[in-house]
């Protein structure tokens, strides 16, 4: 009789809940293992079958580690602030808090139905005031260290989107918002900013110590973008005090600088623009104000720009070079100004060709009449640098600049400080008060959390501030001296709560600190972190930054939060496309659990292919996984739900080798997250077990233990039927006997006059004479030896026997 997944899964999920089977205790006498999932944003759609892939992987490792004697921390929570909930609230008139709570309820039900071994007593929710109290506390520490500050920043302002809000560069396409297609304008706006650039060097250097995919490390290195070069100062012709600073990685090419380009927003543009060029410059600035930084720096777009009418003086040779503005130069990167060497830079070359600017080669090689030469070569047309190679010329150019006080050696970063404020309601309030006398103060720590006020007034303020600006009773404050002030009305971005949540799991109910220092010392760092590669440079970078700040403050004991990172691949639709609601190819795990069971879903998702590979969903595959679990069940259990008679304490040793091989392979594969290979090996063992007359109970118990991290419900039931009264959760992981892996028998082909007529099994240490006797006595061989004379028997040990007859 097939196993009843519905009854079994309901039974054991109830058992785990009632007995708090997965509750984690802070037992420092045991070795620890911290397995972490990237916690989900609880959307209105609920889970799809892609979500459980990563969750199942961490659950398998967590369950295996418990059986290996580790104290395992395996928690789950909710990254619940975010734009979708606010948009939903605006459309429906409902409060985003209620919408979020309902979504969490759905997510939690779905996750529990899949049998994950989370300690639900450690559940966190970033929208809970007891949680964001500490998000606010961390912000205050950043402020006190000078790492949080206010500044006027050029932002992407969408006045018609949600009544007016700032959108990220990634959310702007062709000058419009990704959602809704509303116009976007570049405007300066007061923003809170976090000085992540102060940690740029450490964020790059410490990547070397992490067991992360190299592709993710490289993305972070490129995002931070450390480059070494020089700052160079160009005086503005005709001015005694105006200077333009540029950063270049190639100060050795200064002799080839034939023009300059400033970002249209550069502070000197209006000052240096001549009256003749002012109309053209202003028109150009207006033309590009709706372009995002991503669009402006697209290498494939047509170059555009306008001459300011002003000239800079090249400090290395005193020559005047025209100063242009161009949208491909960003005020937010470097100094907002570049020196252009078109002979040796493709973008500068295209610009120079379009506007007929001089192209002066200073490195030998190539044909600059047709294209920029970006290769290496000795310097030419460069006075004291002539004949030098790149390395020596760069060094000598910097020495010259420094000795003449017109430049200096410098390290620059592509990374910009983190814009930390959002003009939205549904986020953590920033614990700051702006006073009428111009002073800005933090809310005292003992008054945290500053709670987000409950309101149905979620319409934008219309002033560029968040909807909180509409709540006069909340915004306006008066101190004990009668001084009036206003609370900060911007809220924190969706990344804030996720930048430290892994710390709160360690001590989730502590109201005196982020977490107890001794507990942090015991549990950190996270041993295994699994989540999507799409978080490579935002969440992961921000979390590392906050962790390093907390390390410097003595709050956490480790420099890095996540030791090992693994990115699960994407589960695609049956048509090999990404699952999405719009394509109608989303598969709800509830449907699979109801039809086949959670164990089947877990088995199938782990058997589809390597964890980090993308793979298409297959209905046939899910059915095959269910059939295999039923095959495992029927191997041991008869139609009356009792152990089969051949499950016995008797061991005839026929399964010794395959069982011990399986334990060794499965242990190694699960440790290294090769779950598909581990399942495949268990399939091999099950096939061999079906051929055996006796099934030693110790081997059946071993199989059930190995399968239990992947399919925990059916294996709990089998464990009980095998005679155990306790949960399998903490049963000792099986070990293998190395001596049983040694092959003591080998199969040889037996040929008669070169044609294979039979196969025989002989001991690996059998002599040639013994092998010859066994071969000649084989019934199939004897049939081919009738009426012929055996002339010779050739024995090649462990390979073949050839009988020559005539």
Image (spheres, rainbow, N blue to C red):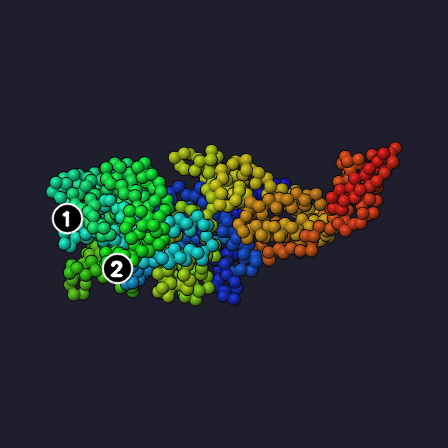
Q: For the point 72% across and 49% down, which residue is it?
A: 654
Assess whether mark 1 and mark 2 are in contact (beta carbons under 8 angstroms).
Answer: no
Q: Position of residue 800 (x, y in %)?
A: 75, 42
Vertical placement of residue 718 versus 792, above or below:
below
Q: How many labels does the image show?
A: 2
- Of residues 767 and 349, the one drawn nearer to the viewer in this rendering: 349
Q: Can residue 128 be seen in this view?
A: no
Q: Position of residue 207 (x, y in %)?
A: 42, 55
Mark 2 element type: helix
Judge from the rendering whether residue 122 lies leftward or rightward of residue 147; answer left or right: right
Which residue carries the number 1 mark?
A: 271
Disc 2 packing (10 Å; few <14; some 14–19; many ≥20): few
Judge from the rendering whether residue 370 lies leftward or rightward of residue 29; answer left or right: left
Disc 1 packing (10 Å; few <14; some 14–19; many ≥20): few
Q: Where is residue 51 in the image (x, y as percent from the top left)?
A: 45, 45
Vertical placement of residue 230 versus 172, above or below:
below
Q: For the point 24% across and 44% down, which residue is it?
A: 258
Q: Position of residue 666 (x, y in %)?
A: 59, 50
Which residue carries the number 2 mark?
A: 403
- Of residues 157 and 225, the one drawn nearer to the viewer in this rendering: 225
Q: Which quarter of the figure has residue 512?
A: bottom left
Judge from the rendering whether residue 439 lies leftward or rightward of residue 453; answer left or right: left
Who comes first in sequence, dot 2 or dot 1? 1
Where does the C terminus fall, quadrant-wise?
top right
Mark 1 element type: helix
Where does the N terminus fall, quadrant-wise?
top right
- Which disc, if any, is residue 280? none
- Of residues 158 and 645, the one drawn nearer to the viewer in this rendering: 158
Q: For the point 20% across and 56% down, which residue is it?
A: 486
- Of residues 348 and 527, the one drawn nearer to the viewer in this rendering: 348
The CA distance from mark 2 to mark 1 is 30 Å
């Amino acid at each position: 009789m097939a196993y009843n997944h519905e009854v079994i899964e309901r039974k054991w999920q109830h058992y785990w809940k009632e007995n708090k089977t997965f509750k984690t205790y802070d037992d420092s006498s045991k070795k620890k293992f911290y397995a972490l999932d990237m916690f989900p944003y609880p959307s209105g759609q609920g889970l799809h079958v892609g979500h459980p892939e990563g969750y199942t992987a961490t659950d398998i490792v967590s369950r295996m580690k418990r059986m290996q004697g580790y104290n395992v921390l395996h928690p789950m929570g909710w990254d619940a602030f975010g734009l979708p909930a606010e948009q939903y609230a605006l459309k429906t008139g409902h409060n985003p808090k209620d919408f979020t709570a309902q979504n969490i309820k759905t997510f939690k039900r779905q996750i529990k139905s899949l049998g994950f071994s989370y300690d639900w007593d450690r559940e966190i929710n970033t929208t809970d005031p007891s949680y964001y109290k500490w998000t606010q506390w961390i912000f205050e520490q950043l402020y006190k260290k000078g790492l949080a500050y206010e500044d006027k920043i050029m932002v992407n302002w969408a006045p018609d989107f949600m009544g007016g809000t700032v959108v990220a560069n990634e959310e702007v396409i062709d000058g419009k918002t990704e959602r809704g297609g509303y116009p976007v304008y570049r405007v300066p706006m007061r923003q809170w900013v976090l000085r992540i650039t102060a940690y740029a060097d450490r964020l790059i250097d410490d990547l070397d110590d992490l067991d992360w995919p190299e592709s993710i490390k490289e993305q972070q290195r490129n995002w931070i973008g450390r480059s070494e070069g020089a700052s160079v100062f160009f005086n503005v012709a005709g001015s005694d005090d105006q200077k333009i600073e540029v950063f270049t990685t190639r100060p050795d090419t200064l002799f080839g600088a034939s023009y300059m380009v400033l970002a249209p927003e550069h502070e000197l543009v209006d000052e240096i623009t001549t009256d003749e060029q002012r109309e053209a410059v202003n028109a150009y600035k207006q033309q590009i104000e709706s372009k995002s930084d991503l669009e402006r720096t697209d290498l494939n777009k047509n170059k555009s720009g306008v001459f300011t009418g002003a000239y800079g003086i090249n400090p290395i040779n005193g020559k005047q070079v025209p100063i242009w503005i161009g949208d491909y130069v960003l005020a937010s990167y470097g100094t907002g100004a570049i020196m252009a060497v078109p002979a040796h830079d493709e973008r500068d070359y295209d610009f120079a060709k379009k506007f007929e600017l001089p192209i002066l080669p200073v490195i030998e090689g190539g044909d600059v009449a047709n294209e920029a030469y970006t290769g290496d070569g000795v310097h030419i047309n460069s006075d004291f640098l002539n004949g030098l190679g790149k390395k020596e010329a760069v060094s000598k150019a910097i020495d010259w600049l420094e000795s003449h006080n017109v430049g200096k050696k410098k390290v620059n970063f592509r990374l910009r400080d983190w814009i930390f404020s959002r003009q939205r309601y549904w986020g953590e309030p920033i614990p700051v008060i702006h006073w009428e006398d111009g002073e800005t103060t933090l809310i005292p720590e003992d008054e945290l959390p500053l709670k987000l006020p409950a309101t149905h007034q979620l319409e934008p303020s219309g002033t560029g501030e968040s909807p909180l600006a509409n709540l006069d009773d909340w915004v306006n404050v008066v101190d004990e001296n009668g001084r009036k002030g206003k609370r900060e009305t911007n809220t924190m971005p969706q990344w804030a709560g996720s930048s430290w949540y892994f710390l709160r799991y360690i001590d989730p109910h502590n109201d005196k600190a982020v977490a107890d220092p001794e507990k942090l010392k015991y549990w950190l760092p996270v041993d295994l972190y699994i989540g999507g590669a799409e978080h490579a440079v935002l969440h992961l970078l921000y979390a590392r930054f906050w962790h390093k700040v907390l390390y410097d403050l003595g709050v956490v004991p480790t420099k890095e939060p996540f030791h090992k990172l693994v990115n699960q691949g994407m589960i695609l639709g049956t048509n090999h496309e990404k699952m999405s609601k719009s394509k109608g190819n989303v598969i709800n795990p509830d449907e699979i659990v109801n039809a086949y069971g959670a164990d089947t879903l877990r088995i199938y998702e782990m058997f589809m292919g390597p964890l980090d590979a993308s793979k298409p969903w297959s209905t046939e595959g899910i059915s095959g996984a269910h059939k295999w679990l039923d095959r495992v069940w029927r191997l041991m259990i008869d139609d009356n739900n009792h152990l089969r008679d051949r499950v016995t304490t008797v061991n005839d040793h026929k399964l010794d080798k395959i069982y011990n091989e399986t334990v060794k392979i499965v242990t190694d594969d699960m440790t290294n997250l090769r779950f598909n290979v581990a399942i495949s090996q268990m399939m091999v063992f099950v096939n061999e077990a079906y051929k055996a007359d006796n099934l030693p109970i110790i081997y059946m118990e071993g199989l059930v233990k190995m399968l239990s991290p992947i399919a925990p419900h059916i294996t709990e039931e089998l464990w009980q039927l095998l005679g155990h009264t306790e949960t399998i959760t903490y049963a000792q992981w099986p070990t293998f006997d190395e001596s049983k892996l040694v092959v003591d028998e080998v199969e040889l082909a037996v040929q008669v006059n070169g044609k294979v007529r039979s196969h025989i099994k002989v001991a690996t240490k059998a002599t040639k004479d013994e092998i010859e006797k066994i071969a000649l006595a084989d019934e199939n061989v004897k049939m081919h030896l009738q009426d012929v004379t055996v002339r010779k028997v050739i024995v090649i040990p462990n390979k073949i026997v050839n009988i020559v007859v005539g």
